[in-house]
Image (tube, rainbow, N blue to C red):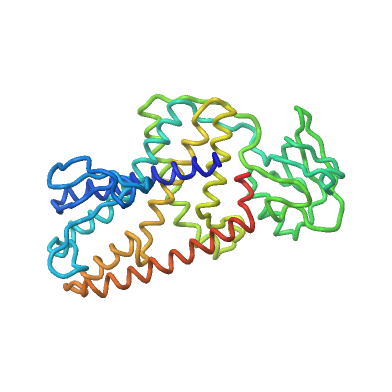
Amino acid sequence: MSSILVALAVLSLLAFVHELGHLIAAKATRMHVEEFGLGYPPRLLSLGHLGGTCYTFNWLFFGAFVRLSERGEPGTVYSEKGKLARAVFFAGGPVCNLLLSVLLFSICFATGWPVPHDLAVGVNKVLPGSVAQAVGFEDGDLILAANGRETTSMLDLIIYSRSVDGDIRTVTLRRRGRRFNLDLPAGAAWFVKPETRGVQLRDAAGWEELVSYPWPLAIKHAVERTAGSVGFLYSIPIRLLRGLIPMDVVRPVGPVGIAQLTGQAARQSAASGGWFPLLQLIATLSSALAVTNLLPLPGLDGGHLLFIGAEALRGQRLDPRRENLVHLVGLIVMLMLILMVTYHDFAAPYPFGR
């Protein structure tokens, strides 16, 4: 239950910041905003009017929304505004999410960023009665190498394992400061998945040093981290097509998967007495939300920007009613995909959110 509440709070924050970005962009481009609501209707109370906008507090306390005024026929919202103003409006939400990501990453770098040393793949858990336990794996082991090949990340280990069809015969471990080789039996494949033959893997193992950076340097690192996250997310399709990333490792995560991840981050924050795990996750999710919304797909901000780009090339705007119909269909398809991902999250829980 606590994981669900934390997930709802995180998603609500991300949605609020996104809509706040649209509000700021609308005000900057002199669009008439009729209502900015905290949560979703039905309305609980009106917080007052400012600059021609009614600010409301609503019963479904999740996220926020921006309601622009309509001119003329329904579906012709903000049609009197030019291409640049509309593009700024739709870009405002993702930009605000990126700024939130930079802010949270900056806090993380300023208050103490864990710098890993002796990078290795960690054994998160060994299941009782499993082959891994019989072989000799223990919780907390560090996998330094497989078949003599150094492994610094879980993804690296999985990709290498698949390249040899799971035929890994020796792993180099570090356990309580001692380094030794562990022989693995033949038979089923090893390490072709994050959870194989009773051993659950985790990334960023080894020992960590908390490093606090001065604020100017923290902001610089935060911008680089956010840019790196955005670049990596956009590169995922290319990496998948080239076989650099296994399809089942980079899986889409729905609300249930996010609840699992935020629950794990909240538990880690409570155990460590610091906010780093939760703040880092929120910053990463905020970047992911920005990237997702900028995809040129109907129903997303990027889809609207695509239509504005097409309008600039054609020299004439498409019929707003047809455009809205395309976006409506896109939203319906998106909701169906979210339902499918949510079902998958229930059927096969995200392994790193446990």
Is 149 placed left or right of 308 in the picture?
right
43 or 280: nearer the viewer = 43
Residue at 43 percent across and 27 percent down: it is 110
Name the spot of residue 155 as percent of width and height, x first. 63, 50
Give the total number of marks visible in the rendering: 0
292 or 338: nearer the viewer = 338
Residue at 12 percent across and 63 percent down: it is 80
Q: Quadrant of the C terminus?
A: top right
Name the spot of residue 315 as percent of width and height, x first. 16, 72
Displayed quadrant of residue 189:
bottom right
71 or 144: nearer the viewer = 71
Is 215 placed left or right of 181 in the picture?
left
Q: Quadrant of the N terminus?
A: top right
Is 258 placed left or right of 323 in the picture?
right
Is 322 placed left or right of 81 in the picture?
right
Displayed quadrant of residue 273:
top right
Name the spot of residue 20 as percent of width and height, x first. 28, 45
169 or 284: nearer the viewer = 284
Name the spot of residue 166 as percent of width and height, x first. 76, 57
Residue at 26 percent across and 52 percent down: it is 66
Up the image or down, 218 lies above or below 191; here it is above
Up the image or down, 76 lies above or below 264; here it is below
